[in-house]
Every structure is written in structure tokens, then in C-alpha cells.
Amino acid sequence: MMADKQPKIAIKGLHKQFGKKIVLNGLDLEVPDGQSVVIIGGSGTGKSVLIKNILGLLSPEKGSILIDNQDVVGMNRAERESILQKVGILFQNAALFDSLQVWENVAFGLIEGRGMKRKQAHEIAIDKLADVGLGPDIGSLFPSELSGGMRKRVGLARAIATDPEIIFFDEPTTGLDPIMGDVINDLIVDRVRHLGATTLTITHDMASARKIADKIAMIYKGKIIWAGPVSDIDNSGNDFVDQFINGRAEGPIQMDVRAG
Amino acid sequence: MNPLASIGRTTISFFNTIGRISLFTCRAVFHCFVPPVYGRLLVRQLIEIGYYSLPVVGLTAIFTGMVLALQSYTGFVRFNAEGAVASVVVLSITRELAPVLAGLMVSGRIGAAMAAEIGTMSVTEQIDALTTLSTNPFKYLVAPRLIAGVLMLPLLVLVADIIGVFGGYLVSVYKLGFNPTVYLERTWDILEPLDVVSGLVKAAVFGFLISLMGCYHGYHSRGGAQGVGAATTNAVVSASVLILAFNYIITELFFAI
């Protein structure tokens, strides 16, 4: 078991459905303070919906999401903003603002969220870009001029720019070659350790999960069906987990491969 | 298929859309009046909507004024009323044609661009990113566009009024042989402040509608490139129809007998 202090994020009985399609079906999860939890699971199992519910981008039908023991479900905007001040997020495709230069993207949370002067925010942005291995010359480019790997790095720099207590990573290595994926994993581990942040990552890349996780949880049909330390993942005793981490088509998880 | 069920679904869908647009409008207007105001973004939109629309609005106005003079003349000459050409040109331009045609042209240029830009931001999670960076998308994306639309359309229409009347003057004087002094005198004599003011009020309303429809359809676009394309089309079509509908309503308010 994890330490008995209060978890940073505690999710209980979370339900979310779109029309008749149930995406989250009574999901329970705890993310201990200062730890890195990775949620694995196939496409369409509700991983991204879970993060969007935690961030308040979607509202669940039932259940609670406690961050620092405060239930964020049903919070008003002002209360939610105080929670979001603690949070950084790396989106799946980085979600950089096309109309802003790279440094403005990185400094966005500092300028707009915290009212910092542009000059000071620029200096911090350049430092954060250096932290993810990008030179100051990159700061003046626009996102459309960057490669996929560079966009992820800029997204990571933006996620850590405000020194958040909690960082969410949505498929951090998707769309990258294995080497660049590993570079991003190393950066995540390095930067998260440096900040001492709590992180929640969703991915279906097992190499990434093994590298950045303290604890892994597997989501299937809207529920966490297994959770444990990363060292136990190969001996989980769970057929669903075994099938997923070994990437086998045969097993209890049946993929819907019908056309149309 | 049950026809009653189909009618029911369509009706519910219609009122659902009306409700969503109404809520969107209330939120958007609220955030126009509540700080913070993003000055840099507002200036960018003022330039985008106002300055960069000048060529298309100017060209539309001058050709409209020229055609109007020509058509009025060929009609009125049958009744020996060709002296009314100057009056018809200036009243038609200021009251109707400049605001409506400028509105439609700006709708095609700006409404589509807004829907495409915000729609792309929506489908690439940039709007979600804004929210998580403690920035209200309505204040950051919608409010500057609405304010710029309301401020810039009247200025564009004022320019269109002048250019449109000038177009009519060019054709009347250099092609139809009108005396320039008499033509300008007739133009000035018939024109009343209400003619111009009504056109400018229309323009402000049209600017609001164009920005609102561009933002609304962009904000709610889903499903990748196809969704953004559909949002762009819907923004232009809905803004154009609303411009024509509100043109009648405002005309009725100003000039109903």
C-alpha cells in the first residue's frame, strides 16, 4: 500500500456517459502526493475523458474528484481557477497556440494566468525551453515551424512553466519515433523529479509507462481493473493486463474491428 | 420511419440550437463588459476586420453605386424622371445597399475566418488548453471579435457610403452626362442624418451577428477538418440569413409608416 497520507488526487465512483454510451463506469483511483501514476488502456476506454473530468473540461454525472481534499465536481469558476493554478498539462498533440510564438506559448500561463510582465515571463520561458533542450532561438518561431518532437518539448515546457504541483500528461509519446519518445520520457522524469510534482499520465505506450511510472493503473470499460507498483506489472496475475502489456490480439479484451 | 417522430426530433433540435445560441450570446456579451479586456487581441481584430476588409468593401460599394446609377437612369428616363437618379443612388446606398452588401461581404471574409480559426482551435484542444491555463475562452477568443465586429462594421459602411455615392457620381457625370454640381446638390439635399444613422445602426448589428455566428459555429465545431469545414459554411450561411432578416426588422423600426 501507498503511504497513509492524504492522496493528492482521489477519484471515487466516477460516472460519465455521452448519450447512451457509458465511458466511465464507477471509476476509483488514488494518486499519492509526489508520485507518478500512469493509466494504461486501449483506445476508447475513457482515458482522455477521465483527465478532462479532473480538469473540469467535462462534468461527470456521478462521483467525486478530490484534489488536495477539495471536491472539484460542481466547483464554480473562481474555485476551479484556484485549482487550475496548481496544474500543468501536456496535451496529446501539444495544443500549442498557432497564432503565438513559441516563447509566448510557454509563458502564456505566467502572463495571462498570473499577470506577470511580458519581459520577465520571456526570461522564464527561455529558461524553461532550455530545460527541455531547446535553444533561445526556438522561442521566436511559430508552432507551425516545429517538428512533432519539438512541439512536444514546447508543450512540456509550457506544462512546467508555472512550476505546478500536479502535471497531467496525455499520451506524451504518441506520434513520435521511439528515440524521440524516449527523449520525452527522460525529460518528463527529469523535470518532474526536479519539481517534485505529482503526475498523472495516460498512455498506451508501455515503454513510456515503465519509464515514468511509480504506479500503473489499467482502465478497461470505464473502470480501473488493476493498479499496482510498476515493478508488479509483469506479474499482475490479471489476464487483461497481461494481454495489454504483451500486445496480444488473443485474450479477454476483444477489439471491435468491424468496418463502418 | 414515423413522420411524427421526425417532426418532433426536428423541432426539439431546432429549439435546442436556439437555446444554445441564446446562452452563448449571453455569455459572450457578458464577457465583453467584464474585465480583463485583452487589448492586443482587440487591436488585432480591429485591424483584421476593419483595415483588411477595406478593399473588398470598397470594390463592392463602387460597382454597386455605378450599377445603381445606370439602372436607375434607364428606368427613370422612360418617365422623364432621370433627375431622381442622384436621390435614388444616395438613399439606396446609405439606407440599404452599403450596410447589407458590406455585411454580406465581411461575413464571407471574416465570419468564415473566425469559424475556421476557432474551429481549428477547438478540434486541436487549444481551447481546452486555454481553460487549463486559467484563461476564459470567451474573454480571450469571443469578446475581442464581438467588440471589433460591432465597432468596425459601421466604419466600413461609412466608407462604403462615400465610395458607393462616388461610383454613382462617376457614371452619372462621365457616362450619362449629368451636371456634376447639380448631381452633388441633389445628393446633398435629399440626404438626412437618419438615412446614414440607420445604415450605421444596421452595420453595428450586422457586425455583431457576423462575429457571433463565426465564434459560435467555430466554438462548437467537432470532428476534425470536416467539422471545421461545416462550421465555416454554417457561420457564413447563418450570418447571411440573419443579416437579411435583421435588415428588415431594423428598417421597419426606423422607417415604418
Image (cartoon, rainbow, N blue to C red):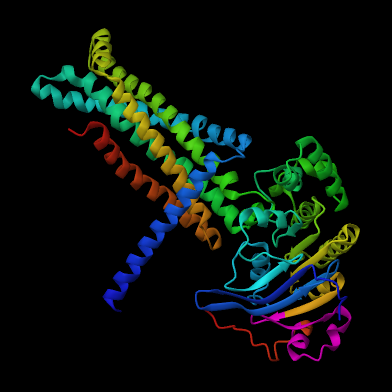
Q: Could you tell me which quadrant the N terminus of chain A lies in?
A: bottom right
Quadrant in the rendering for residue B7 = bottom left
Residue found at x 73% / y 88%: A240
Residue farthest left in this picture: B79
Residue farthest top in this picture: B181
| Residue A83 inside the magenta-drawn segment | no
Residue found at x 83% / y 48%: A129
Q: Is residue A27 visible?
A: yes
| Drawn side of residue A175 relative to residue B205, left or right | right
| Residue A229 inside the magenta-drawn segment | yes
Which residue occupies the foreground of this view, B63 or B19? B19
Residue B56 coordinates in the image, percent (x, y)? 44, 32
Residue found at x 72% / y 46%: A108
Residue found at x 68% / y 54%: A81
Which residue occupies the foreground of this view, A93 or A120? A120
The magenta-colored residue range is: A219-244
Q: Is residue A40 visible?
A: no
Quadrant in the rendering for residue B205 = top left
Residue A29 coordinates in the image, percent (x, y)? 74, 76
The number of callouts visible is 0
Position above or below: B180 against A14: above
| Drawn side of residue B8 relative to residue A11, left or right | left
Quadrant in the rendering for residue A150 = bottom right
Residue B185 coordinates in the image, percent (x, y)? 25, 10
Position above or below: A48 against A241: above
Residue A131 coordinates in the image, percent (x, y)? 87, 51
